[in-house]
Amino acid sequence: MYGYDHGGWMFGGGIGMILVWLVPIALVIWLVSSWGKRTGQESSEKTALDILKERYAKGEIQQDEFERKKRDLSG
């Protein structure tokens, strides 16, 4: 009967159909959630002080300019 005996498909009726639908749905949910986590991390907003520290670390600004801008940001 080509594997369709007892009304089953692959593993035996409803269980096989549940797995056929559940596995792809779970995979899609996992992919969407992992993609959302990655884009959320990338888009997290940096503070002005974080940007200033990065610029100083990259050598874009000198120490005196860094200190002056840091004081301006502090208050």
Image (spheres, grey):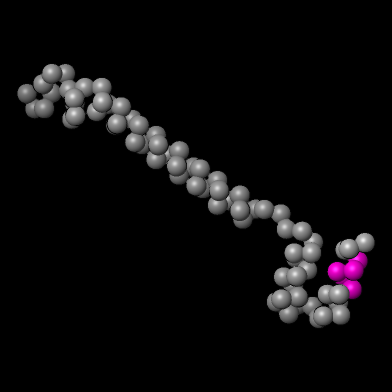
Quarter that holds the C terminus: bottom right
Q: Is residue 69 left or right of residue 30?
A: right
The percent position of residue 40, horizontal first and vertical second, equals 61, 49
Q: Is residue 55 magenta?
A: no
Vertical placement of residue 36 versus 20, above or below: below
The percent position of residue 13, horizontal first and vertical second, equals 21, 22
Q: Is residue 70 magenta?
A: yes
Image-quadrant location for residue 61: bottom right
Please identify the residue farthest to the right as the structure is shown: 75
Q: Which region of the structure is painted magenta?
A: 68-72
Q: Is residue 41 left or right of residue 17?
A: right
Characterize the magenta stretch by its predominant secondary structure.
helix
Residue under the point 29% across and 31% down = 19
Vertical placement of residue 29 versus 35, above or below: above
Vertical placement of residue 1 versus 29, above or below: above
The percent position of residue 57, horizontal first and vertical second, equals 71, 76
Please identify the residue farthest to the left as the structure is shown: 1
The percent position of residue 38, horizontal first and vertical second, equals 55, 52
Quarter that holds the N terminus: top left
Please identify the residue farthest to the top as the structure is shown: 6
Residue under the point 34% across and 36% down = 23
Q: Is residue 72 left or right of residue 30?
A: right
Residue under the point 86% across and 69% down = 70
All told, the count of numbered labels is 0
Q: Is residue 31 left or right of residue 23?
A: right
Residue under the point 81% across and 81% down = 62
**Nearest to the observer: residue 35 or residue 74:** 74
Vertical placement of residue 75 versus 6, above or below: below
